[in-house]
Amino acid sequence: MTTASLQLHKSISISFTSPLSIPSTQPTNLLFSLTTLDKQLVCSKRPSVAANARKPNPWLDPFDFGDDPEMENGSLFTEGKQEEDPRPPDNPNSPYGFLKFPAGYNVEIASLALKVRGDVRRCCCVVEGGVYENLLFFPAIQLIKDRYPGVQIDVVANARGKQTYELNKNVRWANAYDLNEQFPDPAEYTDMIGVLKGRYYDMILSTKLAGMGHAAFLFMTTARDRVSYIYPNVNAAGASLMLSETFTPEGLNLSEGGFHMYHQMLDWLGRPARGVPRHPVPPLKVSILSKLKEVVETKYKNAGAEKGRYMVIHGIESDSQASMQSKGDTDSLLPIEVWAEIAEGIRDIRPVFVIPHEKEREVVEETIEDPSVVFITTPGQLAALINDSIGVITTNTAALQLAHAREKPSIALFSSEDKGRLFAPWAEEKKCVVISSKTGKLIDIDVEAVKNAMEIFEGSLALV
């Protein structure tokens, strides 16, 4: 018995070194040789897949070798964009509507194209950050709207970031949820999962760097496509198991990418697929409600300014969260003493100083003689104020991007040239003058250079 076990041990050890050379009289060795040969034959088929295809995750499906190049689909729902929702309109004479059933039970409404072509009827965007980060996500929302006609877009953002979506007409619902809470309240956590799951999303996008915890949050929404950024380090372990598509940024702070901070996600959203060419990234645009315009007009008229006869100054130093700074540029506020020097060079135009908190009003009135001060904390009111002005002088805050969206001339003050190139790459094409500090600190900005750049507003004043 000892001799037989020794022979079996030798045969198995030989099969690992050269399985194809083992005689067929040994069944154990034949089993190992056939298994290895089968692996070689299967692996030989993989190079036939397109070279630019994404490598599948072996943990999700060990037999997923990508799309089959020899598979032929029918002509139904295989190419082109999706169509508008084919459901009939609601019956205005019925209190219950027309064909209104509880979500998940009206199976006849779910079209075949959801599976064949990958249509997206409902999409949720989980956007991390404040006003600045959510404002720069507007081109992605417009791209989704163009790529998937008829899609309904919802947003989950922080309380401060949620305010931004009063400027976006493409968003249906915006929910406030603290995405940065490390240990969320169980009741709030499960309630938000229940809300998102009950809306039956086809795709959910997230700009928060996902680890295992956030990936599980997205997974429990039961969306078909789960797309998110992940940590560029070991904290991303296990996250890709629960996500359909992942993007790995260069650093831990996504906002350091500047104006194109979401370029990876935008490239994926606009990708060519199923007969649809690549979609270009749309420009940053905002829409302002008429009610906002009326409220803001009352504010700046009470401050002594007239429509089309004032200039917005934004970026006064304050500890308020309503300063609308970018998380990628913390040195982006100037003390009121520097703004007072800049205001001395303004001629024939009334400067309007925007304060993020009422406690700053007294400081401004003590430093500047007879100033026009407007207290504004929401991006919607700030956009309406900029829309009625002739231009903006601002540091790297949301006011710069709002001026760009409303095509108003602006002077942007940055702490360095690198920051200026990152956050205002469109400055040469638009009416924007970028002035950077030579020392790397915003406090050392050249005031005389700012005064000389005010010539950009002369043409705007002449058109009023």
Image (cartoon, helix red, strand yellow):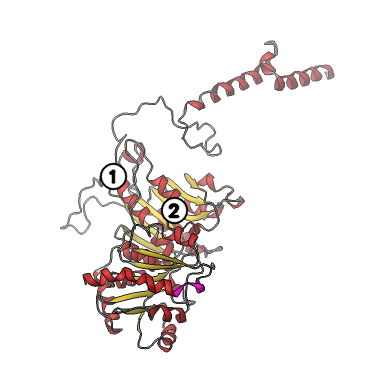
Q: At numbered mark 2, what does the secondary structure look like: helix, strand or loop?
A: loop
- Hey, what amino acid is under mark 2? Tyr
Q: Nearer the viewer, mark 2 or mark 1?
A: 2
Q: Is residue 52 left or right of residue 24?
A: left
Residue 103 visible in the displayed image:
no
Q: Quadrant of the N terminus?
A: top right
Tag of residue 109: 1
Given residues 283 and 174, the one toward you in this image is 283
- Hey, what amino acid is under mark 1? Ile
In percent of width and height, residue 374 lies at 35, 80
Up-down: is 202 above or below 387?
above
Q: Which residue is mark 2?
A: 262
Q: CA distance from mark 2 to mark 1?
A: 33 Å
Up-down: is 275 above or below 392?
above
Q: Quadrant of the C terminus?
A: bottom left
Write down the quadrant of residue 347 in the picture: bottom left
Residue 388 visible in the displayed image:
yes
Q: Is residue 445 left or right of residue 310?
A: right
Number of numbered tags placed on the structure image? 2
Given residues 304 and 38, the one toward you in this image is 304
CA neighbours of label 1 inside 10 A, class few (<14), some (14 to 19), many (20+): few
Residue at image position (31%, 59%) is 285
The residue most toward the left is: 93
Residue at image position (39%, 74%) is 451
Is residue 79 inside the magenta stretch? no
Write down the quadrant of residue 75 in the picture: top left
Region rendered in magenta: 442-447
